[in-house]
Image (cartoon, grey):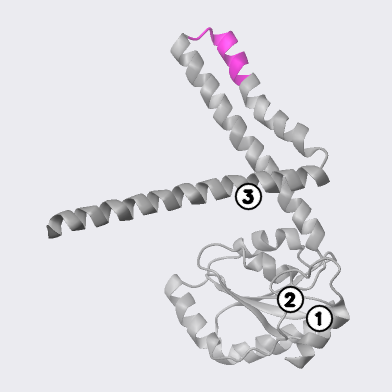
């Protein structure tokens, strides 16, 4: 009896996991479609470019089949490959243009750099607003295999002082671990919002994954001195003075 109950429970659990995966897949498809519709309204070139990216590999596959005079099986295989490559290229093109549009909308808004840093994948440890001002300037800390990366967003003449103070404060705790500093912006010597992730991921490896954990534990003892920024870019129409007053009250 107990064995039958265990088997029944296992089947139910497996069915539940399968249903959850199916639901997640359906939700992803729906979200992607909604994102495509939104992007299409803003980007008039999106649809023709996506169609072109989808058709190009298929046209090449047909041309290859005609030139080589392939058998039926080979013909079908090449055409299927062309369709799959076309779908992949169309999806990549859509994602790239959607990302570019998103970066253009949030560029320069307080909290935009923090939002980009939160999208980092892997062993990166992100701490938002470890230092900041009531003018919504902020320094965010990223710990990874390069060491410690301090990312500042805001007025350059204010964040440079914040970076110097934070580097001095951390140096007492982390010893010889490399510290990189980045100012997000569009001026010379700054890193643009759209290339921030790429810039960080291209930094050289200086410490191991185990040292990253140790470093995070040490730095977690340092109290944050930053004003609590919104989680992500400010929404359109948000009043800066209202946000600053809310920060001052915290």
Left or right of 86: which side holds 154?
right
Other residues around mark 3 within 10 Å, as few (<14) / some (14–19) / many (≥20): few
How far apart are the two marked residues, 2 and 3, measured between alpha carbons? 32 Å
How far apart are the two marked residues, 1 and 2, measured between alpha carbons? 19 Å
Mark 2 lies on residue? 152
Residue 135 in view (yes/no) = no
Q: Earlier in the sequence, mark 1 or mark 3?
A: 3
Span highlighted in magenta in the image: 60-70
Other residues around mark 2 within 10 Å, as few (<14) / some (14–19) / many (≥20): many
x, y percentage for residue 192?
A: 77, 62
Which of the two marks, 2 or 3, is nearer to us in this view? 3
Residue 100 in view (yes/no) = yes
Quarter of the rendering containing residue 46: top right
Quarter of the rendering containing residue 147: bottom right
Q: Find numbered disc 2 in the image and state the secondary structure of the residue it sits on.
A: strand
x, y percentage for residue 132?
A: 74, 85
Counting labels gives 3
Q: Which mark is residue 31?
A: 3
Residue nearest the observer in this picture, 244 or 2: 2
Q: Find numbered disc 1 in the image and state the secondary structure of the residue it sits on.
A: helix
Which part of the image, by quadrant, shows the N terminus?
Answer: bottom left
């Amino acid at each position: 009896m107990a064995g039958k109950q265990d088997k029944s429970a296992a089947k139910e659990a497996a069915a539940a996991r399968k249903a959850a995966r199916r639901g997640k897949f359906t939700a992803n498809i729906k979200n992607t479609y909604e994102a495509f519709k939104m992007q299409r309204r803003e980007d008039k070139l999106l649809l023709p470019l996506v169609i072109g990216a989808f058709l190009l590999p298929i046209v090449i596959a047909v041309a290859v089949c005609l030139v080589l005079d392939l058998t039926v099986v080979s013909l079908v295989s090449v055409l299927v490959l062309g369709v799959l490559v076309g779908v992949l290229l169309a999806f990549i093109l859509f994602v790239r243009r959607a990302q570019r549009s998103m970066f253009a909308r949030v560029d320069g808004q307080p909290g935009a750099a923090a939002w980009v840093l939160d999208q980092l994948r892997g062993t990166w440890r992100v701490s938002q607003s470890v230092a900041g001002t009531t003018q919504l300037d902020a320094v965010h800390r990223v710990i990874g295999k390069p060491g410690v990366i301090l990312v500042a967003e805001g007025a350059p003449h204010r964040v440079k002082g914040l970076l110097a103070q934070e580097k001095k404060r951390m140096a007492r705790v982390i010893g010889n671990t490399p510290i990189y500093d980045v100012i997000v912006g569009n001026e010379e010597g700054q890193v643009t919002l759209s290339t921030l992730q790429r810039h960080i991921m291209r930094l050289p490896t200086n410490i191991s994954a185990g040292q990253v954990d140790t470093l995070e534990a040490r730095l977690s003892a340092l109290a944050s001195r930053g004003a609590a920024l919104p989680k992500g870019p400010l929404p359109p129409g948000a009043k800066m003075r209202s946000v600053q007053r809310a920060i001052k009250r915290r």
